[in-house]
Image: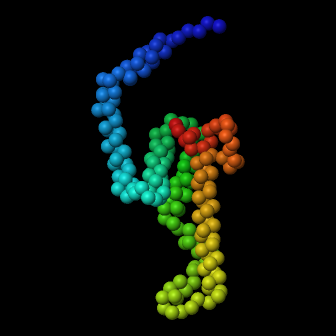
Amino acid sequence: MKVEFADSFFDSLKTLSRHNTWWYKTYKFLRWDIKHFIQNVWTFRKELWDHRWWDYRFTLNLFERSLQVQEKGMRIGGNEISETRDPKLKAMRRVLELLKNNREDNYVDRAEEELGQLQNLGGFLEGIDDTPAQVKHNRKVFVRARQIEKEEWKELWTILEGTKRSRKVGDEYDGSDMRGWWD
């Protein structure tokens, strides 16, 4: 078997060599890096403004915004065929929905839709005692809300991990998790 190199191979080596020079790195910094930095600051301005170090919620806000940008880019300008792109977009949209639910903390409202409105919540301020039936119903709504929250949190990380089965150390990467969400 005879191995030959195309001219483009050597051109690629020259390009790689040139990209490691100080003058190209300076050019790249001035031409592209500053531009991308300013675009990123603008894109993430709300998340950066609100970001604090002490709560995971702020990190999830940045992740949510980043995923919105990625989903839009894949949907509008992606180069991937629809057979492989559509499942990725579906997973991204579900993750965005789960992150939105977490951000809005709408679990009690959704539990109320399933089980009925909370009863007599303002009663303790007015000196009116809740009946045992009201207490039982309210407890059921809050338990269901917490259950929805736990289920969605678990689903979020299952989607990002990319598998419903437990993955062992050393398993081959199958491309189904978040790392495969590229064009």
Which colour style is shown? Answer: rainbow
Q: Could you say where residue 63 lies in the image, as x and y percent from the top left?
A: 47, 51
Residue 153's place in the image compared with 26, above or below, is below
Residue depicted at 53% across the width and 68% down the height: 106
Residue depicted at 61% across the width and 47% down the height: 161
Q: Is residue 72 visible?
A: no
Q: Which residue is at the front of the view, 109 or 77?
A: 109
Instruction: Pick out the residue farthest to the bottom.
Output: 127
Q: Could you say where residue 62 lies in the image, as x and y percent from the top left?
A: 44, 52
Instruction: Residue 19: name its quadrant.
Output: top left
Residue 137's place in the image compared with 82, above or below, is below
Q: Could you say where residue 2 lies in the image, as x and y percent from the top left?
A: 61, 6
Residue depicted at 40% across the width and 57% down the height: 52
Q: Is residue 84 visible?
A: yes
Instruction: Pick out the residue farthest to the top.
Output: 2
Instruction: Residue 115: name its quadrant.
Output: bottom right
Residue 132's place in the image compared with 21, above or below, is below
Residue depicted at 64% across the width and 88% down the height: 132
Q: Which residue is at the front of the view, 5 or 56?
A: 56
Q: Which residue is at the front of the view, 168 or 98?
A: 168
Describe residue 30's horizontal placement relative to residue 133 as left or right: left
Q: Could you say where residue 166 lies in the image, as x and y percent from the top left?
A: 69, 47
Image quarter of the N terminus: top right
Total marks shown come to: 0
